[in-house]
Image (tube, helix red, strand yellow):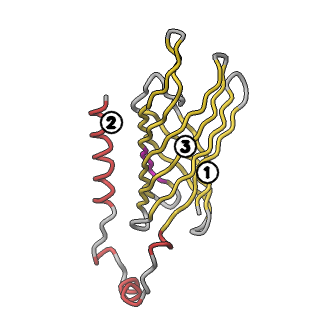
């Protein structure tokens, strides 16, 4: 399963490089003129800040805060890193889950994007009346829709955990909503 996930991530990443390459033929004459006169933006203008916040109450209580920071490599491709904190409570007890990961987002069409993410989360494991902490690998692949302008946007994402570790706090599909600046 890990080989499949790593191969999927490699193909996914390689497709971004192929799709993100523009040639001079892709630009109109007006774009070519503006391209040479356009001032270069600083690296801070290419940063994308955002993340997700989740709340769920019921037989399972889940509170999640997941800030992310990305870098706009092209107008369509944003790789980045993120942190994740989850408070999880069910009939067996409560625990704190924390970790981080890397993500890639590629704008496919006007507001639709593809998303891939690899996370490592540290969580408490209950086995045979003993408690220990373990790092859980999570591979999320999917897509979403964003609305808003270049300054601020809201995105909803539907992801599937392709690793499906039995201790993962996620159930397929993983639906997220978040803001990006």
Residue at (58% x, 48% y) in the render: 156
For the record, the magenta segment spans: 113-117
Residue at (54% x, 29% y) in the render: 169
Toward the top, the furthest residue is: 128
Toward the right, the furthest residue is: 58
Residue at (46% x, 22% y) in the render: 166
- Answer with mark 2 or mark 1, whichever residue precedes in sequence: 2
Kind of element beneath mark 3: strand
112 or 128: nearer the viewer? 128
Q: Main secondary structure of the magenta part?
A: strand
Circles 2 and 3, Cβ within 8 Å, touching? The answer is no
Alpha carbons under labels 1 and 3: distance apart: 13 Å
Kind of element beneath mark 1: strand
Position of 153 compared to 24: left or right? right
Position of 146 compared to 117: left or right? right
Name the quarter where the C terminus is drawn.
bottom right
Residue 31's place in the image compared with 90, above or below, is below
> Badge 3: few (under 14), some or many (20 or more) residues near its Cα, within 10 Å?
many
> Badge 2: few (under 14), some or many (20 or more) residues near its Cα, within 10 Å?
some
Q: Which residue is mark 3?
A: 84
Name the quarter where the N terminus is drawn.
top left
Residue at (44% x, 73% y) in the render: 43
- Answer with mark 2 or mark 3, whichever residue precedes in sequence: 2
Q: Which residue is mark 2?
A: 5
The label on residue 22 is none
In magenta stretch: residue 138 = no
Q: Position of residue 83 (x, y in %)?
A: 52, 47
Kind of element beneath mark 2: helix
Q: Which residue is mark 1?
A: 178
- The quarter of the picture where residue 163 lies is top left
Q: Position of residue 162 (x, y in %)?
A: 40, 32
Alpha carbons under labels 2 and 1: distance apart: 25 Å
């Amino acid at each position: 399963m890990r080989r499949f996930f790593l191969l999927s991530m490699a193909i996914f990443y390689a497709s971004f490089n192929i799709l993100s390459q523009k040639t001079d033929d892709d630009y109109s004459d007006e774009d070519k003129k503006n391209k040479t006169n356009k001032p270069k933006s600083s690296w801070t203008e290419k940063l994308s800040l955002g993340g997700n916040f989740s709340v769920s109450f019921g037989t399972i209580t889940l509170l999640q805060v997941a800030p992310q920071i990305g870098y706009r490599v092209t107008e369509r491709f944003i790789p980045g890193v993120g942190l994740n904190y989850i408070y999880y409570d069910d009939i067996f007890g409560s625990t704190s889950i924390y970790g981080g990961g890397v993500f890639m987002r590629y704008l496919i069409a006007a507001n639709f994007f593809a998303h891939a993410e690899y996370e490592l989360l540290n969580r408490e494991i209950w086995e045979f009346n003993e408690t220990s902490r373990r790092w859980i690998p999570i591979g999320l692949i999917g897509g979403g829709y964003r609305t808003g302008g270049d300054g601020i946007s809201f995105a909803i994402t539907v992801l599937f955990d392709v690793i499906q570790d039995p201790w993962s706090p996620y159930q397929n599909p993983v639906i997220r909503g978040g803001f990006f600046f």
